[in-house]
Amino acid sequence: VIVEITESSTLRDPDRTCALLQEITDKDIRLAIDDFGTGFSSLSRLRDIPAEILKIDRSFVSGVSGSPDGQAFVRAIIQLAKNLGMIPHAEGIENEDEREFLIANGCDQGQGYLFAKPMAPEDIPRFNFSSQSASGVPLLLPADTGLDPRVDLPLRAGGG
């Protein structure tokens, strides 16, 4: 189970929030910080949150392959996540150029229209989640695997 919390919500009552989040993770529930970089970031608080996943907001991922400034920013978020012991996870991946940029820069988890579009509740049981992800998180495979990331994603050893 992964619980997502927005970055901005952690700043409202930081001491109480960090304590609550620690209780959640102590129960073996994984924590992801959503919408990173879109609010008023507090890097000192980010360090204190017991999150496993740092989600890179789609506003940074969109069009990243054609923007040197955007590329630098996404690289910095990926490195920040890794340096804090978190898994970087990109949101809003819509094309191969974005996926390839993310892989080349050390982000191998993500989500977006490249993998699946929103679907009606009745279509969810027919969607093959096991081939899409490890622990429900899409993996971004390098193009040289010959697999279609929308339908052929295997589980990675130790992935999650």
Image (spheres, rainbow, N blue to C red):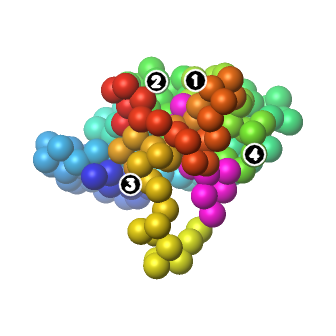
* Residue type highlighted by circle 3: Glu
Residue 153 in percent (x, y) is at 52, 39
Q: For the C terminus, give its image quadrant.
A: top left
Which of pointers 4 and 3 indicates the residue nearer the eye? 4
Identify residue for label 2. 82
Compare marks 2 and 3 and give the one earlier in the sequence: 3
Residue appearing at x 59%, y 31% in the figure: 141
Identify residue for label 1. 106
Identify residue for label 4. 95
Instruction: Determine the main secondary structure of the stretch shown in magenta.
Output: loop
Identify residue for label 3. 4
Which of pointers 1 and 4 indicates the residue nearer the eye? 4
How many other residues sit within 10 Å of disc 1, few (<14), some (14-19) or many (≥20)? Answer: some
CB within 8 Å, label 3 to label 1: no
Compare marks 4 and 2 and give the one earlier in the sequence: 2
Mark 3: secondary structure: strand
Picture layout, residue 125 above or below residue 12: below
Residue 42 in percent (x, y) is at 47, 41
CB within 8 Å, label 1 to label 2: yes
Viewed as shown, does residue 42 lie left or right of 99? left
